[in-house]
Image (cartoon, rainbow, N blue to C red):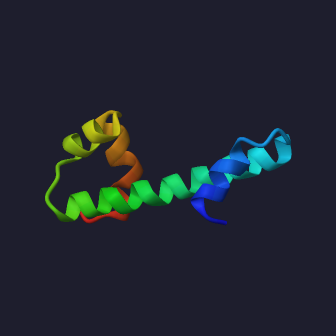
Amino acid sequence: MEVADLAKAAADHDPGVGLAAVAALRALLEELEAMHVSNARARGWSWERIADALGVKRQTTHRKHARRTKG
């Protein structure tokens, strides 16, 4: 299912459809975040800079992503 379809499904009045779409969007968001954090680290961004961009604490970002990236 494409992102636009997921967004439409998330607004569906049927809770089963809406919740399934929310779960799929959450998984997509996690993949996108991991990809962009890896890209930022490869370009020399600090954990603090990444955390600031995500609007979270550095320690949270590092704990979540450090094992997936080098450094």
Locate residue 68: give its quadrant.
bottom left
Horizontal side of 15 relative to 64 (left or right) equals right
Residue 30: horizontal and vertical position, in percent? 50, 54
Horizontal side of 50 relative to 7 (left or right) equals left
Q: Which residue is located at x 26 percent, y 45 percent?
A: 50
Taking 22 as reference, is 32 above or below it?
below
Q: Which residue is located at x 63 percent, y 49 percent?
A: 7
Residue 18: horizontal and vertical position, in percent? 76, 45
Question: Which quadrant is home to the C terminus?
Answer: bottom left
Taking 67 as reference, is 23 above or below it?
above
User: Which residue extends farthest left?
Assistant: 44
Between 14 and 22, the one nearer to me in the picture: 14
Residue 64: horizontal and vertical position, in percent? 41, 49
Horizontal side of 30 relative to 60 (left or right) equals right
Q: Which residue is located at x 60 percent, y 52 percent?
A: 25
Please tell me how many numbered marks the rendered image carries.
0
Between 46 and 66, the one nearer to me in the picture: 46
Between 56 and 19, the one nearer to me in the picture: 19
Question: Which quadrant is home to the N terminus?
Answer: bottom right
Residue 51: horizontal and vertical position, in percent? 29, 40
Taking 18 as reference, is 36 above or below it?
below
Horizontal side of 13 relative to 36 (left or right) equals right
